[in-house]
Amino acid sequence: MKEIWGGFSWVRRPVIIKYNGRKIAASMTAMPHAGNDSAPGGVWTSWRSGDYGAGTNHDYIKGNGIDGHFDIHFYNSTRHNDGKVDTNHQQCIKISAGVQ
């Protein structure tokens, strides 16, 4: 993924997720964030990557050289940091769905 984006990036891109034979329109970024590889996933930690500060650790896969997770948004999904729909992700989803 890092190679496809040309490095870690907050740039949103339209993507198609293939799951169980289905194709689902989505939007994605390639910036790992909100995690701490040295702390258990799902627990409170005093440090999280991407300047997210203290909070719930969103790093569940350990030992992969990544602190945190990558965002994948679907139609009307919300951001984990504020619970709001991201209009830029929604625009990319429309592109990946072929409706824009």
Image: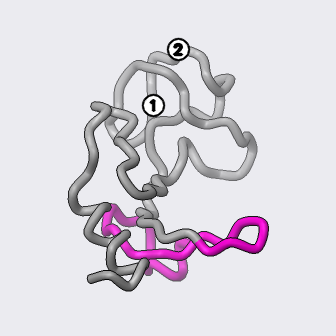
The location of residue 24, given as percent across then percent down, is 56, 69
> Height in image: 50 above or below 99?
above
Instruction: Report the coloring of the rendering.
Output: one colour
Q: Which residue is mark 1?
A: 48
Residue in the image at 59% along x and 16% along y: 43
Residue in the image at 54% along x and 42% along y: 68
Give the amino acid type for the residue marked by disc 2 in the picture.
Trp
Mark 2 vs mark 1, CA separation in Å: 10 Å
> Height in image: 10 above or below 51?
below
Q: Which residue is mark 2?
A: 44
- Judged from the image, the secondary structure of the residue bearing numbered disc 1 is loop
In the rendered image, which quarter is residue 19 located in? bottom right
- Judged from the image, the secondary structure of the residue bearing numbered disc 2 is strand
Magenta region includes residue 19 = yes
Q: How dense is the environment of label 2, judged by Cα within 10 Å: few (below 14), some, or many (20 and up)?
A: some
Residue in the image at 61% along x and 23% along y: 42
Q: Is residue 48 left or right of residue 61?
A: left
- Please identify the quadrant where the C terminus is shown: bottom left
In the rendered image, which quarter is residue 40 located in? top right
> Height in image: 27 above or below 34?
below
Q: Determine whether label 2 and label 1 are within 8 Å by CB.
A: no
- Please identify the quadrant where the N terminus is shown: bottom right
In the rendered image, which quarter is residue 18 located in? bottom right
Residue nearest the observer in this picture, 67 or 10: 10
The location of residue 79, given as percent across then percent down, is 35, 41
Q: What range of the chain is rendered magenta?
A: 1-23
The location of residue 30, given as percent across then percent down, is 45, 64
Q: Is residue 98 left or right of residue 41?
A: left
